[in-house]
Amino acid sequence: MRIHHLEDRPGILLIRQNEKPHYRLKNPLTQKIYENNCVRPAPDPQDCTDFQRYIKSGGPLRPNVSNIGAPTYQLSKYLAGLLSQLIGNSAHHVKNSFQFVQVLESLRVQPEDLVVSFDVVSLFTNVPIVDSLEHLSHHFEDDVMALFKHILTSTYFRFDGQFYEQTDGVAMGSTLSSVIANFFMENFEKKAIEQATHKPVCSFRYVDDTFVIWPHGQEKVTEFLNHLNGLHNKIQFTMEKEGYLPILDIDIYSKTDGSLGHKVSQKTTHTNLPTPEFASLSCYTNNQPSLP
């Protein structure tokens, strides 16, 4: 499939000049940070490697951009390392599927409880940059904030010989993107639960997927969904109830004894055919990255 009229997609701005975008920081850096984390002279911008995979019916375009070797790559890694120290301290945080399975084994569901999952629609392309920078400003000094702003507002990429700028959200494939998305969502979920009239028994989140045990019935869980979707116009959730709930790469289901079971989740496009070099392996491997 060939992508036509990319510049007409929401959140994508075509740079029509026949030149490479400039990468020059407006704010001074300390010599050490500059030498360790900035690339001189500026190499080619990152290439967009995949579009079709992220195009959903009626949804925004989600470019998958390789950030390795890009002008902001080293600086993104540096900032991701700084920010990683601030996330993962919430009681709702899920590091990976292995840890989540251990959590599930300790939970019990009452007969009146609902087992529910909430999923953010296209989180990466909808992370509010202005709000994220505001949250960051409570933790970092002005000189570091200048670096965060530079990275989060310098999302250029090349596709089919043209240069584009992603004007909304964060780039899929950037070192900093998953960390800043998780940072924003930690602030979001704290506000959401504090302001909710009715609260879940427990809530666990991996980036944009949230698992909840809900004790207040069908009507109130719909009110809770509306509450979540009313907090920020860019952050909208879908909800699944009962049955097999996909979180990370596992499906969760309720057992008759009140415990929670799980099985490996397979997407509809999964062929069940291993690559030759791994054909002899029978162990289950986790495909989701661990978060701090």
Image: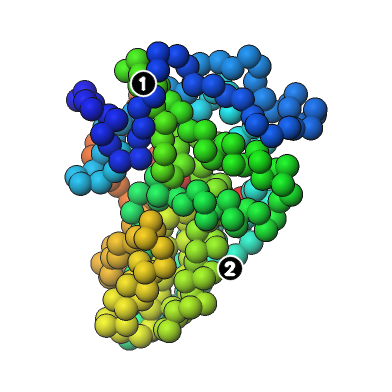
Residue plotted at (73% across, 42% down): 143
Between marks 1 and 2, how big is the CA–CA gap?
47 Å
> Quarter of the image holding residue 32?
top right
Q: Is residue 102 above or below residue 51?
A: below
Q: Measured from the top left, where is residue 238 in percent x and y?
A: 30, 62
Q: Find residue 150 and report its horizontal and vertical position in percent.
A: 59, 36
* Residue drawn at (56%, 15%) of the image: 43
Mark 1, other Cα within 10 Å: few <14 / some 14–19 / many ≥20? few
Direction from residue 147 to residue 115 in the image, left or right? left
Residue under the point 74% across and 49% down? 141
Q: Residue at x 32, y 72 (%)?
A: 226
Q: Secondary structure at mark 2?
A: loop
Amino acid beneath label 2 = Ala
Within 10 Å of disc 2 (Cα), the crowding (few <14, some 14-19, many 20+) is few
Label annotation for residue 16? 1
x, y percentage for residue 22?
54, 21
Q: Is residue 91 placed above or below 28 in the rendered structure?
A: below
The quadrant of the image that shows the N terminus is top left
Is 201 placed left or right of 290 in the picture? left
Q: Which residue is mark 2?
A: 91
Dividing the picture into quadrants, the one containing residue 121 is: bottom left
Q: Position of residue 221 (x, y in %)?
A: 32, 78
Counting the numbered discs, the total is 2
Residue closest to the eye, 202 or 184: 184
